[in-house]
Image: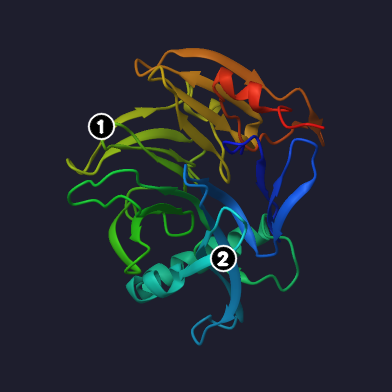
Amino acid sequence: ELDDDGGLIALGGKSILKLDDDSRIIWKLDIPAHHHFNLLESGQIFTLMRRYITLPYTLGVGKVCVDYVAIISPTGKVIKEVSLHDLFNEDISWWQWLKIYRTSIEYYLLGVERLENSPLDIYHANSIKILDRDIPGFGNKGDALVSFLKLNTVAVIDLDEEEVRWKWGEDVLSLVHSPRLLDDNSILLFENGWKRNYSRVLIYSPADDEIIWEFLGDPPYSFDSNYRGQTEPLPNGNILVTVSDQGWAFEVTRDKEVVWKYHNPTFKDGSRAILGKMGRYPVGIVSKIGQNST
């Protein structure tokens, strides 16, 4: 992601760094950052990171992967870490643990988690967004909106007090990605539809506790991304959707009309290559690229 001075913030699993417009490293922080980060106007960065621990109730699995939120200064220093495991561990019932283990083992057998002796990924946090305003009954400015793939849960977390303010989705969602807070305080998100053979884009109203909009493919299986996916609200009110596993993206209106589609032209092993994420940048941001180049 480009910051206000034209630098590029990027993460790669073992580190997060900032590059200038000549690809020179301005700073690099060696932490196990993964999936997603949120860059604020202040220059602070909120990112997900993981660590491996051993729990007494892993059913013989051994080490597990747990997630944290790391708050990073504009100069690349860790200000604070918040353990998401500490916040959610005690709320998970034995029945939920069994479901998490079952899903994780199925992932492993399908080759999604390929490494031998790989730690069990029990939460799989995959998105973080910092609230820009107070919303009664939901969260306050500065709280983090986080999604957990394995928990089928979207949650709001007070990072100062280190407590969960709000959560939803456990009995409704089937794997989830990229929750985004909309102007009307509803939440846009991508539901993968694990084992259902089709995905959905949803808008959920926390105030009304109901799904107020959904988009499916026609037929439903034509829009299916079991493990990955992204949504992005656009300034014109439309929604940009990345169907990662099928390697394509589209823009859709609130009237459910598809404006355009893009299909990844690259193929691998006979299938269209994965498309991690497609994003839209404002026209003016292009002028920042190269403005400091020597």
Q: Secondary structure at mark 2?
A: strand
Residue 252 position within the rendered picture, expressed as x and y whole percent measured from the top left: 45, 19
Dividing the picture into quadrants, the one containing residue 215 is top left
Residue 63 position within the rendered picture, expressed as x and y whole percent measured from the top left: 61, 79
Measure the alpha-carbon separation of dots 2 and 1. Answer: 33 Å
The quarter of the picture where the N terminus appears is top right
Residue 249 position within the rendered picture, expressed as x and y whole percent measured from the top left: 59, 25
Task: Please name the residue shown 43% across and 59% down the image.
Answer: 151
Left or right of 54, for residue 10: right
* Residue for badge 2: 78
- When the figure is inspected, residue 206 is found, relative to residue 251, above or below; the finding is below
* Residue 22 shows in the view: yes
Task: Please name the residue shown 44% across and 67% down the image.
Answer: 84
Residue type of the residue flagged with mark 1: Asp
Q: Secondary structure at mark 1?
A: loop
Task: Please name the residue shown 66% across and 39% down the image.
Answer: 7
Residue type of the residue flagged with mark 2: Val
Left or right of 64, for residue 92: left
- When the figure is inspected, residue 20 is found, relative to residue 70, above or below; the finding is above
The numbered dot on residue 184 is 1
Task: Please name the residue shown 31% across and 69% down the image.
Answer: 161
Using the image as rendered, state which of residue 44 and residue 260 is in the foreground: 44
